[in-house]
Amino acid sequence: SSGASCEFAQLAGAVDADGLRTQIDELATFSDTPAPSVTRILYTENDISARTYIKDSMKSAGLTVREDAIGNIFGRWQGTEETSVVGTGSHVDAIPYAGKYDGVVGVLGAIEAIRALRKVGFTPRRSLEVIMFTSEEPTRFGFGCLGSRAMAGSRNIYEILEGAMDKDNISFTEAARTAGYLKEGEDLKSVAVTNETYSGFVELHIEQGPTLENEGKGIAIGIITAIAAPASLKVDFKGDGGHAGAVLMPFRNDAGLAAAELAVAVEQHVLASGSIETVGTTGVMQIHPGAVNSIPREAHLEIDVRDIDEDRRDMVVEKIHQSAKDISNRRNVELQSFDVVNQDPPAQSGATIVEAATSASAELGFKSKHMISRAYHDSLFMSRITPTGMIFIPCHKGYSHRPDEYSSMEDIVRGVQSGGDVRALEDVR
Ligand code: GLV
Ligand code: MN
Ligand code: MN
Ligand code: MN
């Protein structure tokens, strides 16, 4: 739009830090666990309350709100021209005992960027759309980015979701209907968008690692060039169980020990990759029946493996599978299942978005650094349908997925300004 430079120069003063802080704090009250922790699981009461809060915030910023069948929420600022749309956004679901910034900064921050753009008199040529994605976190159904995967039309996602069950045997479909989505006659496939819909997508997020803070050179902004490839596995072992006093050691087949051995094997295979970029975590390990005087009869593990190099990540997954089989044979414990829940490729950011974000932060006077994201984000899937990039801001000691996660308002506002400077985004493609 004309006179753009003068408008954008005012952007710095136009972001309402106090208003944004209040919203972040208010949203955090929708939680299944006490403050300062935040727990917000897909389609639960608190998730639905948070959704209402986001829709109200979008409406008060003058956005036109729409939801799709899976519950992705879109707030659109109509542009003057009928062209493809500039998208931005993130998620507001939270894993158990998480903090209040992960995802939230990229949703409420994006809405605040729109408010600020209105204040400085900006008129968008392309429509701008804030997206709140459904279930970036994998907590309820075992794999993440449900909303963005479905938008990107990733292969099999619709069938997988239709068959997905949570730990209480509630199906995805039933859970979605309870929350008011996936109504009778509505089809999950309708969530898919074409590659022509968006001209670009940018996601603002806390770093969730210590790099920006540790640089110690006042680097305020991380610009993401690639997102590491995530995979997750579910493994079940079954033995005979029995009395902890009466069954002698040679006659046991302890499913719990098989699980423990596999967890250690995960660490060994990851370390053997030879790269610091390979990471693996056994984040869930449950034994049944879970009594001190009972030999574990069943064990359930959930394992997360990631790497910026897809082949190396896949090799580790294969070695974990081999170990599960070996342990099962050696311990005479049945390997009931070894499911690769997801095994996604990494993503490269769009060069145009990286350039736009780099020049925006430079013009705003912020030092930035190009880096990779080892955590995954909805941007991993948005990158399949449109040039995508991410803007990271520092967070205290890199803490994330824990209650003491913290980013200062100064850093959040710098992130909002960098994302709000949309001049370059208007011209991508
Ligand atoms: C998602 O939040 C992840 O685990 O990276
Ligand atoms: Mn997270
Ligand atoms: Mn997140
Ligand atoms: Mn994430």
Image: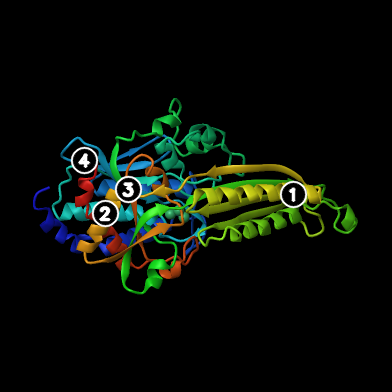
Q: Residues within 10 Å of mark 2 (few under 14, many from 20)?
A: some
Which residue is labeled 2 in the image? Answer: 355
* Residue 141 seen in the figure: no
Which residue is labeled 1 in the image? Answer: 326
Are the residues flagged by discs 4 and 3 in contact, CB closer than 8 Å? no
Residue at 46% in and 61% down: 99
Are the residues flagged by discs 1 and 3 in contact, CB closer than 8 Å? no
Query: Which amino acid is tagged 1?
Result: Asp
Q: Secondary structure at mark 2?
A: helix
Which residue is labeled 4 in the image? Answer: 78
**Residue 356 point in image, percent of width and height:** 25, 53
**Residue 378 point in image, percent of width and height:** 41, 47
Q: Secondary structure at mark 3?
A: loop
Tell me which corner region of the image, top left, top right, bottom left or bottom right, holds residue 188.
top left
Query: Mark 1 vs mark 2: which is more N-terminal?
Result: 1
- Above or below, 382 against 94 in this view is above
Query: Mark 3 vs mark 2: which is more N-terminal?
Result: 3
Are the residues flagged by discs 4 and 1 in contact, CB closer than 8 Å? no
Q: Residues within 10 Å of mark 4 (few under 14, many from 20)?
A: some
Tell me which corner region of the image, top left, top right, bottom left or bottom right, holds residue 28.
bottom left
Residue at 20% in and 45% down: 427
Query: Which amino acid is tagged 2?
Result: Glu
| 423 with respect to 219 (left or right) | left
Disc 4 residue: CB within 8 Å of ligand 3: no
Residue at 62% in and 50% down: 302
Q: Secondary structure at mark 4?
A: loop
